Image (tube, rainbow, N blue to C red):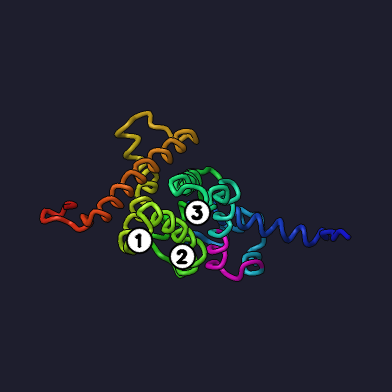
Amino acid sequence: MSVSTSPASSARGETRQRLLEAAGEVFAERGFRNATIREICRQAQANLAAVNYYFGDKESLYAAVMKYAHACALEKYPLAQRESEEVPAADRLHAFIRYLLLSIFDKGPPAWLGKLMAREMIEPTQALDDLVATIIYPMSQKLGAIVRELLGGQAPDDLVHRCQMSIIGQCLHYRNARPVIQRLFPGYQYLQEDIVRMADHITRFSVGALRGLAQRENNGRGRLGSKGLPG
């Protein structure tokens, strides 16, 4: 037996969707603190009371936008095809990096996540704890498992964590330093095929580094030498 959707229910769903879309654009452009409910509702063509009705308050709307953008990114650039442990760790790392870069540079809702997270790092809000728990921590665990496997499985946690941050740092550099990069290397493009090449390069660079570190750990040469370089 099929269940029909009433016109009222459909209208409510459309209003909520419009609020998410409008809020994503406004938050990404202005940040949480400078964005106003009035501007969001005006852009969404919704009543001022709509945010309170559907989300409760501005902070809850902000958190909902983050989760919505993340869900859009996963739907558009799924990681599931490379999540099986039977797939080599290097291939899973490539899928992770490719997903991250494509979602960061996407023109639609996924791009809001990258912009909002960049602002969140500079000006943390009360939503950060929830964002870490629901979005960042699961992704970190996924990347950490891949890194640990590439390091040999017995790597100390602090090494795994540093390697994770190095990989993420490479990805974020292409976005955060974009104005400098395009001045240093005129003509450098950020089309999808260019972003895929970025993912290929970061993966090869990272896998080579991880395997080199794994070899040093196995040879007992993981500690820093007297001049601060690997001994």
**Image position of 26 (left or right of 50):** left
Q: Amino acid at mark 3?
A: Leu
Res. 154 mark:
1
Q: Looking at the image, which residue is at 46% across and 52% down? A: 114
3 vs 2, front mark:
2
Image location (x, y in percent) of residue 36: 52, 61
1 vs 2, front mark:
1
Residue 18 picture quarter: bottom right
Q: Residues within 10 Å of mark 1 (few under 14, many from 20)?
A: few
Res. 62 mark:
none
Judging by the rendered image, the residue that carries numbered circle 3 is 113
Residue extending farthest front = 219
- Badge 1 marks a residue whose secondary structure is loop
Sequence-wise first label, 1 or 2: 2
Q: Amino acid at mark 1?
A: Gln
Q: Residues within 10 Å of mark 3 (few under 14, many from 20)?
A: many
| Part of the protein shown in magenta | 54-65
Residue extending farthest left = 226
Main secondary-structure element of the magenta-colored stretch: helix
Q: Mark 3 and mark 1 in contact (Cβ < 8 Å)?
A: no
Judging by the rendered image, the residue that carries numbered circle 2 is 132
Residue 143 picture quarter: bottom left
53 versus 118 height, above or below: below
Q: Looking at the image, which residue is at 51% across and 43% down? A: 106
Q: Looking at the image, which residue is at 49% across and 43% down? A: 102
1 vs 3, front mark:
1
Distance Cα–Cα, label 3 vs label 2? 13 Å
